[in-house]
Image (cartoon, rainbow, N blue to C red):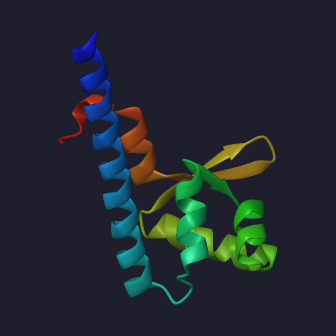
Amino acid sequence: MLDAVETTAQQAISTVNAIKAALFDYKHRIRAGYKFYSQDLINNLFTHPYTKIEFVQRDLQISRMTATKYLEELVAGGFVSKHKGGRSNYYINIALNQILLKPDQRKS
C-alpha cells in the first residue's frame, strides 16, 4: 500500500515539474517573440489544457478581434493548436496537453 502511495506521489511531482517547465518555456519564448506577452496570457494558457477567444478576451480585457489575432499568432508559433467545435474555435495548449495525456512518458 505504501509503495502505491509513493509511486502516485512521485508521478504527481513529475507532472507538476513538467507543467512548471512548460509554463516557464512558454513564458520566455512568448515574451521574447511577441509584443502582446503578459502574465495574464500565460495564466490563461495554463489554467486549462485549452482556451477560447472569449476566455482570452475576458482575462486580458481586450477586444474579440485582438484576442483572435493573439491566438492565431500563437497557433503560427506552435504554442497552441486550433480546433473547431460547433460554432466555436478551441485553442489547445500543445505542451500542457502532451504532459496531461502521456504521463508514462515523462521523466522525473
Whether residue 13 is visible, yes or no, is yes
Residue 102 against residue 95 in the figure, above or below: above
* Residue 92 position within the rendered picture, expressed as x and y whole percent measured from the top left: 54, 50
Counting from the top left corner in percent of width and height, residue 85 is at: 72, 41
Image: 13 above or below 4: below
Residue farthest toward the left in the current orientation of the protein: 107
Image point (33%, 68%), residue name: 25
Up/down of 17 relative to 104, above or below: below
Q: Quadrant of the N terminus?
A: top left
Does residue 36 appear to the left or right of 98 in the view shown?
Answer: right
Looking at the image, which is closer to me, 41 or 72? 41
Answer left or right for 69 relative to 108.
right
The C terminus sits in image quarter: top left
Q: Position of residue 32 (x, y in %)?
A: 38, 86
Is residue 91 visible to us here?
Answer: no
**Residue 49: x percent and y percent?**
54, 47
Q: Is residue 73 left or right of residue 88?
A: left
**Residue most extreme to the top:** 1
Q: How many marks?
A: 0
Quadrant of the image occupied by residue 36? bottom right
Q: Residue at x 36, y 76 (%)?
A: 29
Q: Is residue 52 left or right of residue 2?
A: right
